[in-house]
Amino acid sequence: MKRVITLALAGLLTACSSQMQMPSIDDILPSKDLDRTMYLRGDFTLWDAEPQYQLEQVAPGIFQTEVKFSTPGKVYEFKVADADFSEGYNCGYSDMDPAGQSLVLGQAANADCNTIYNYFSFKPAAKGVYVVSFDYRNSNQPKVTVTKK
């Protein structure tokens, strides 16, 4: 009887699988809210927390700011951090990410928010305004992405 029920359930799930959407890992893992203001801080701000580079929430757990990179081919260095570079809020590249510190346009990179010197680097191919996104939906593995506006 147990085998019949198991087979029936498996058949039912298989028949419905094309219509069911499995939750993503971000829906399953615990998240915590950002309890402070975060900034894009880099060589273009002299590493200061400047109001024009404050990250704004654009969706649950997603924060963004815009930055103008005016020198194509120059390597820009930056982190996402609070005003004090506090432990847990000092986000640079993750040593565990095989991509390393160099960001690729449009590709998310893992961040480590307990770094001191691990800043991201980005070399724009063209001058213009770029959007830096900080995905904090999974606070255990935040992500940083750069896209062209």
Image (cartoon, rainbow, N blue to C red):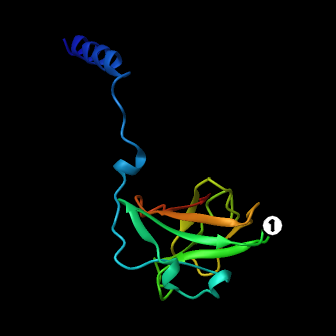
> Viewed as shown, does residue 50 lie left or right of 58?
right
Residue 21's place in the image compared with 131, above or below, is above
Q: Residue at 55%, 65% (x, y): give it.
A: 111
Q: Give percent across and percent down for residue 125.
A: 77, 60
Foreground of the two, 1 or 72: 72
Name the residue type under label 1. Answer: Gly
* Residue marked by disc 1: 73
Q: Residue at 79%, 71% (x, y): give it.
A: 74
Q: Residue at 73%, 64% (x, y): give it.
A: 124
> Viewed as shown, does residue 145 lie left or right of 24?
right
Q: Give percent across and percent down for residue 75.
A: 76, 71
**Disc 1 residue crowd, few under 14, some 14–19, many 20+, Cα 10 Å:** few
Q: Quadrant of residue 118?
A: bottom right
Residue 87's place in the image compared with 9, above or below, is below
Q: Quadrant of residue 127?
A: bottom right
Q: Residue at 25%, 13% (x, y): give it.
A: 8
Check disc 1 and report its element: helix, strand or loop: loop
Quadrant including the C terminus: bottom right
> Viewed as shown, does residue 57 lie left or right of 11?
right
> Viewed as shown, does residue 103 lie left or right of 16?
right
Residue 63's place in the image compared with 117, above or below, is above
Foreground of the two, 37 or 92: 37
Q: Give percent across and percent down for residue 58.
A: 40, 62
Outermost left residue: 1
